Amino acid sequence: MTDSKQLIVPDDEPLMSHAFVSKIAAQVSLPYRRPKAREIVKRNGDLEVRFICGADCLPYGKYPRLFELWACTMIKTRNECWNPETMTLSIGKSFRDFLELLNVNVGGKSLRTIKPQLESLFKCAYIISYSTKTKSKGANFTVAETYNIDWLRDKPLHEPGTFENWVTLSKGYVQMLEDHPVPIDLKIAARFKSPMSLDVYWWLTKRYYRMHERVSITWRQLYDQFGSDSKEMKKFRQNFKEAVAEVKTAYPQARITCGREYVTLYPSETSVAPVSQVRREEKTAERRRSAEEGHWTGVAGAGRVWTTTDLFDVTAARAHFDGTTPAQECRYCLFDERNRASHGPLDGGVGEAEDVPLFEF
């Protein structure tokens, strides 16, 4: 299961620098080309997802993936276009803006391609199941309950904030999107041209968050997870290797090798840093700033001086306290005037530490 504590982007991340994809999409994939079958099954370990067609064909290609990425992000970030009470997403210009962030040209021709793809997605049914020897659980739902889209309009008809284009999602689909979504880097995702590259990137992102040792996966397992267009394993392997190469170009930290029998993953730096890593880096930066800008450092039996890590020296500090170094030559007196009060001979050989305020203003 996903460690949700490791899959949360800090609240102060820049708007739309990161997006979220469902953990289901990060484990199994929709078709890449128009499929002949009206039902397909994808597997990843104990997870099985059955996609059932409700339109002319199953959803396939890049646009259904990008819609789910957008919908998951809007729901996760509680964007104004999402109404959690009615479970309705206002599509309109917000979806166009999102596509443009991903370098997708939104014009008349592409809209004619997007329209049937999203309609197929809205009508598609998901049957999700996790089965082990001792436990089974699952969920069945259709993506959308109702929708109304004027595909050629890109602006609201009335006052700002109201849209003619909307989709009311099913409760099951929303719960799937909300269940520990995986954060991804939009700048990386925008560089991929093929839908398989998107799938591989999402999959690697999820795997690397909890990976501590290398993992080898058979080509048969990967075919059950990603394959559907290529009946021949040889062709699937070729397509997968090309997708991996594209992902590694945009995400060079990903350590993955494709061998004859296995694809091997090695622990790698995540493309989006988890909260724990971000906080550690913030603390390290704060300590570095403190070391460079100055801090109070104590000398046993003498007192404290305002200094930096590089400036501090015990012998020089004692010379400061006992006055053997003249104030005009003392490194601490020259560094900060607060040190002048403690410069000079110590009564009885022991000086009193300066009363350091708790807060500096």
Image (spheres, helix red, strand yellow):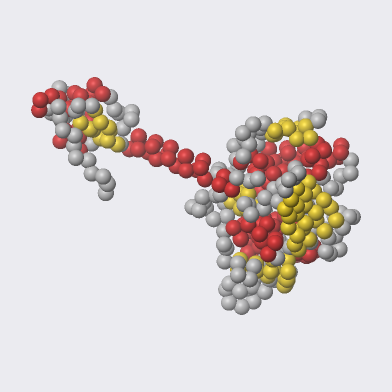
Q: Residue at x 73, y 55 (%)?
A: 138
Return the x and y of residue 293 as percentages of the image width and height. Answer: 33, 38
Return the x and y of residue 93 as percentages of the image width and height. Answer: 64, 66
Q: Quadrant of residue 216?
A: top right
Please determine whether, in this image, residue 23 is positioned above or below residue 110.
above
Q: Residue at x 56, y 47 (%)?
A: 5
Return the x and y of residue 43 as percentages of the image width and height. Answer: 78, 46
* Residue that protrudes farthest toward the front in the picture: 134
Q: How many marks?
A: 0
Please determine whether, in this image, residue 5 is positioned above or below residue 144.
above
**Is 44 left, or right, of 324 in this rendering?**
right
**Is 8 left, or right, of 59 in this rendering?**
left
Residue toward you, 109 or 327 = 327
Q: Residue at x 57, y 66 (%)?
A: 80
Work out whether residue 250 can be spotted. no
Please determine whether, in this image, residue 172 is positioned above or below residue 147.
above
* Residue that protrudes farthest toward the left in the picture: 347
Residue toward you, 45 or 258 = 45
Work out whether residue 88 can be spotted. yes
Please determine whether, in this image, residue 80 is positioned above or below residue 335.
below
Residue toward you, 161 or 168 = 168
Q: Quadrant of residue 336?
A: top left
Return the x and y of residue 75 as percentages of the image width and height. Answer: 61, 61
Q: Residue at x 70, y 65 (%)?
A: 170
* Residue that protrudes farthest toward the bottom in the picture: 158
Residue toward you, 5 or 107 = 5
Image quadrant in which the N terminus is located: top right
